[in-house]
């Protein structure tokens, strides 16, 4: 990963992350108020239970008073409180979790929308598996924060406040004494958060690396098997997995030390303190058994929610780390280039002009140097040159995948920067060497969910590029299923489908990036026929390795190390006896060697 993107791995301030997460709850404030009211009601009902037991013990059981009517009221009240507490707690927890799931739904949509707006320069550097990890695993951890942590925290904090109110009602001195427990618990929580944050950050990063390695291995499995790289890949995967395991193990040891065991020690000391207090009090005056029962009951109830909260600190810590990683991605400012200025010109003719365009991907080494050319409406321009000469970079700039920093690109006399992205993309057709098909069916892959393209348009586009010849032979024709990346189709069939997808848009500018580079000779004939029909009446820029496919181009540019070293028609370039002539001679010689002897 480049230095430019390393900040994406740095943790954010956890307090700011938490505040930012809370802003997602603002749109749901009405239902949160309802849930909070139910929470207070349920908590109050739970807390009043031991006080009713205390009244029964001290006012009726101990003095031997058995007033039937009063006891029935006490029993009914006790049962009623527990039933109402169960109903209210269930309802408020359901509301809190429903809100939490909606918040995570919104967060995932936000982060995915942000990823879609990032420029290709970002995807060139950041591994795909790492992105998948942030959108799925990290947001799943944040979901646990809302569902398993925040609802429990709010419920238990309200419960603890109620417990202290009840304690003060029973015995002010002892309640004040119990307040001294709180600082110890707060110290444990802060110590745990501080120590665990680095472990969880490491765990999240290693999981992201695991996903990246998995994604790379699955997509490149054919190469791995052909070159017998299974052992090496397995070894590298094991190393990352071991590092992830070690980070988990460290966090588990920390959990085992600072979570329940530490709280249990404090709870035992608190119980000893309370019993000692009542024991000393009994030496001078009678002790109310009901008060003792209620106080011990509240003390036990006090530590149970504390234990629940501390046990969820690990989830809380993981969620904050994951949320920080998500927000780092959402705050990344490497956006795809967009229009500049208030003008909104329309792409009508498709006349293209490059003026002294110089470009670099990394800001250090120029891959294009003072590129200048003009393509008139309806003309075909071909780009040829060795690998790395800058052909694809010209296409990337014209499609505005990257910004032009030096020089200028004009379309129909207007600066490329002044066009809306929608205007450029809707009127430009791009066919890549390795066409990408989506999971779905053939019709959806040609239409790409554009409702303006009818079924008749889909069929017409397929027929126009000769793709109907194999589609009609399939059992379900245009409804035939397409698996991931169209793996069940040949390279030629995928290419014809990409042609049909492009022609369904009826673009004014056509860009071909080595469209015939990876197909057989028989399929190439069909593709070449389709290309000739596609280019008629359209401005076309074609990158070609097979020079025989661009003989009829109006102009050919020969690039070498990012510069235009030759330009002209096919015949003119052959007469120059330069690089183009050498490339053509080499290809013709190879072609003759491939022809069978008669």
Image: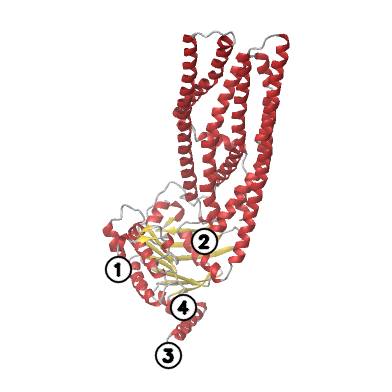
Find numbered disc 4 in the image and state the secondary structure of the residue it sits on: helix
Residue at image coords 59%, 11% = 62
Q: Earlier in the sequence, mark 2 or mark 3?
A: 2
Left or right, 525 with respect to 296, comes to left
Q: Can you give x and y, in whole percent of width and height, for residue 574 in the image?
A: 46, 80
Q: Viewer-proximal residue, 443 or 332?
A: 443
Find numbered disc 3 in the image and state the secondary structure of the residue it sits on: loop
Find numbered disc 1 in the image and state the secondary structure of the residue it sits on: loop
Q: Earlier in the sequence, mark 3 or mark 4?
A: 4
Instruction: Name the mark nearer the viewer: 3 or 4.
Output: 3
Q: Earlier in the sequence, mark 4 or mark 2?
A: 2
Q: Earlier in the sequence, mark 3 or mark 1?
A: 1
How crowded pointer 4 is (Cα within 10 Å; few <14, some 14-19, many 20+) is rated as: many
Instruction: Name the mark nearer the viewer: 4 or 1.
Output: 1
Q: Earlier in the sequence, mark 1 or mark 2?
A: 2
Left or right, 501 with respect to 60, comes to left
Instruction: Write down the residue under mark 2.
Output: 218
Instruction: Write down the residue under mark 1.
Output: 473
Distance from Cα at disc 3 to Cα at disc 4? 31 Å
Distance from Cα at disc 4 to Cα at disc 2? 44 Å
Residue at image coords 53%, 18% = 48
How crowded pointer 1 is (Cα within 10 Å; few <14, some 14-19, many 20+) is rated as: few
Q: Which mark is residue 597?
A: 3
């Amino acid at each position: 990963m480049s230095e430019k993107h390393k900040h994406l791995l740095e943790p954010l301030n956890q307090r700011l992350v938490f505040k930012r997460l809370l802003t997602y709850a603002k749109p749901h404030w009405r239902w949160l108020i309802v849930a909070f009211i139910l929470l207070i009601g349920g908590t109050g009902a739970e807390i009043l239970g031991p006080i009713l037991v205390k009244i029964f013990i001290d006012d009726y059981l101990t003095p031997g008073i058995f007033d039937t009517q009063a006891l029935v009221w006490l029993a009914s009240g006790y049962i009623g409180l527990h039933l109402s507490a169960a109903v209210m707690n269930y309802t408020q927890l359901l509301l809190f979790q429903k809100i939490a799931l909606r918040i995570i739904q919104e967060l995932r949509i936000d982060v995915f929308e942000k990823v879609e707006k990032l420029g290709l320069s970002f995807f060139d550097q950041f591994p795909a598996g790492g992105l998948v990890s942030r959108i799925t695993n990290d947001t799943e951890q944040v979901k646990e924060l809302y569902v398993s942590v925040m609802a429990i925290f709010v419920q238990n904090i309200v419960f603890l406040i109620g417990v202290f109110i009840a304690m003060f009602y029973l015995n002010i001195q002892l309640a004040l004494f119990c307040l001294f427990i709180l600082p110890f618990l707060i110290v444990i929580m802060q110590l745990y958060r501080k120590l665990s944050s680095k472990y969880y950050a490491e765990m999240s990063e290693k999981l992201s690396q695991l996903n990246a390695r998995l994604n790379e291995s699955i997509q490149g499995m054919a190469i791995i098997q052909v070159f017998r790289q299974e052992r090496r890949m397995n070894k590298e995967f094991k190393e990352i997995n071991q590092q992830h395991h070690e980070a988990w193990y460290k966090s588990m040891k920390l959990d085992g030390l600072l979570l329940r065991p530490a709280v249990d020690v404090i709870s035992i000391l608190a119980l000893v303190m309370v019993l000692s207090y009542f024991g000393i009090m009994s030496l001078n005056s009678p002790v109310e058994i009901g008060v003792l029962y209620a106080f011990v009951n509240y003390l036990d109830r006090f530590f149970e929610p504390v234990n629940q909260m501390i046990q969820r600190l690990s989830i809380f810590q993981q969620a904050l780390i994951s949320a920080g990683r998500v927000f780092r991605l959402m705050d990344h400012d490497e956006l795809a280039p967009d229009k500049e200025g208030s003008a909104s010109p329309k792409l009508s003719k498709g006349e293209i002009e490059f003026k002294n365009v110089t470009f670099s991907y990394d800001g250090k080494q120029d891959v294009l140097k003072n590129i200048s050319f003009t393509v008139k409406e309806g003309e075909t321009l071909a780009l040829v040159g060795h690998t790395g000469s800058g052909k694809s970079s010209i296409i990337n700039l014209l499609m505005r995948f990257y910004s032009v920093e030096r020089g200028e690109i004009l379309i129909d006399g207007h600066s490329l920067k002044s066009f809306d992205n929608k205007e450029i993309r809707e009127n430009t057709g791009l066919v890549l060497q390795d066409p990408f098909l989506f999971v779905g069916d053939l019709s959806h892959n040609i239409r790409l969910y554009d409702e303006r393209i009818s079924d008749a348009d889909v069929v017409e586009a397929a027929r126009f590029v000769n793709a109907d010849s194999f589609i009609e032979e399939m059992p379900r024709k245009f409804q035939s299923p397409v698996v991931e990346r169209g793996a069940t189709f040949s390279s030629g069939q995928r290419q014809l489908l990409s042609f049909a997808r492009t022609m369904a848009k009826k673009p004014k500018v056509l860009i071909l990036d080595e469209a015939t580079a990876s197909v057989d000779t028989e399929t190439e004939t069909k593709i070449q026929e389709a290309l000739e029909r596609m280019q008629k009446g359209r401005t076309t820029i074609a990158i070609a390795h097979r020079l025989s496919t661009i003989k009829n181009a109006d102009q050919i540019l020969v690039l070498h190390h990012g510069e235009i070293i030759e330009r002209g028609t096919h015949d003119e370039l052959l007469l120059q006896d330069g690089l183009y002539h050498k490339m053509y001679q080499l290809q013709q010689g190879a072609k003759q060697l491939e022809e069978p002897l008669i």
